[in-house]
Image (cartoon, rainbow, N blue to C red):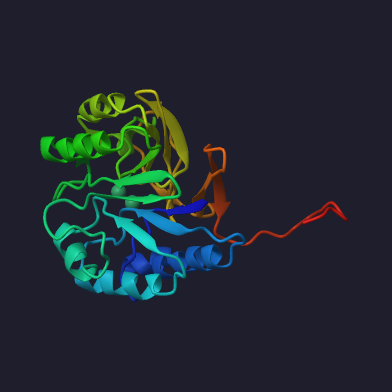
Amino acid sequence: MIIAQLSDPHVTVRQSEFHDLYLTIDKLQRAIDRVNAMEPRPKFAVITGDLVNEGGADEYDALSAVLATLEIPAYLGIGNHDCRETFRQKFADHAYVPKTDYIQYCWEEEGLRHVMLDTNVKGQAWGRLCEERLAWLDKTLSEKPTMPTLIFMHHPPFLTGIKPMDEMGLKDADKFGEVISRHKQVLRIFCGHLHRTISSNFYGVHAEICASTSHKVMLNLTGSERLGTVDEPADILLHLWTKDHSLVSHVCFTEEAQILWELEGYPE
Ligand SMILES: [Fe+2]
Ligand SMILES: [Fe+2]
């Protein structure tokens, strides 16, 4: 089974300054076209937040229109740029979206459990998992202690070295770590928010950030406050769940690449 993780599409409406700069609708479409054309095709997609740029109803309508072209199911999570209530209203037809409270839910496929968390704090760029959200996570993980589990969330729980982004990271990450360390079935933590592919280790669990389908954050490891965006190629992650129950993650650029050389006569 292959899981396609997309993140931070930041969809906004056309003819806006933001869209003119980043072409977010077109770039999400490119990522979706890439996923639709894949062989073998991923079983489902997960989008780890910052679905839209300003949380507007018109932006969610634009997002819905693009997502309608995705030929596999999509599980959506929210980020700091989203509006929980507008998202809930616009995606009420997605059966997994909770009718009240936080956008947290879980689902199972092929012996693998997936948990979506909601790190959104209204009006803030940083994120938090409050007591209520952590209690839900603890209870949910306690229900199936032996089923391998992936966690999806917007704000990464680890520091990346990109200072201005770390300053808008997950607050009180240790409280989340305490819950994770009680549940040994957690295999990976997959995040977004940083607009770069970055991996680390958090309380003994491999944690990885999926970049944006749109723009990348400038790589600045100097510790300064300098922050910008760059036009590096966009990518998504493909998580391959193998028959022997190992999970392998691949970076996949959304633009097609030219084949430069290929071994001839190799059987399919
Ligand atoms: Fe983002
Ligand atoms: Fe974000």
Q: Which of 90 and 169 is in front in this view?
A: 90
**Depth check, front residue: 85 or 101:** 101
> What residue is shown at x 52% (from left), y 52% (from top)?
2
> In which quarter of the view is residue 57 placed?
bottom left
- Please tell me in which quadrant of the rendered image residue 175 appears: top left
Please determine whether, in this image, residue 246 is positioned above or below residue 233: above
Image quadrant containing the C terminus: bottom right
Q: In this view, does 31 lie to the left or right of 119?
A: right
As rendered, which of 48 and 195 lies closer to the eye?
48
On the question of residue 214 being in view, the answer is: no
Q: In which quarter of the image is residue 50?
A: bottom left
Q: In this view, does 218 lie above or below 255?
A: above
Residue 39, how many percent across, how many down?
62, 61
Q: Can residue 163 be seen in this view?
A: yes
The image position of residue 217, as x and y in percent, is: 41, 46
Q: Looking at the picture, how far across and down is residue 209, in whole percent?
A: 42, 41
Tag count: 0
Q: Could you tell me which residue is drawn at 24 percent across and 34 percent down?
A: 142
On the image, the x and y values in percent for residue 81 come to 25, 55
In the current view of this chain or complex, which residue is farthest to the right? Answer: 265
Query: At 32% from the left edge and 68% from the top edge, which residue is drawn?
Result: 17
Q: In this view, does 209 lie to the left or right of 1?
A: left
Taking depth in this image into account, of 183 and 52 the one nearest to the observer is: 183
Residue visible at 21% across and 41% down?
Answer: 127
Q: In this view, does 205 lie to the left or right of 39?
A: left
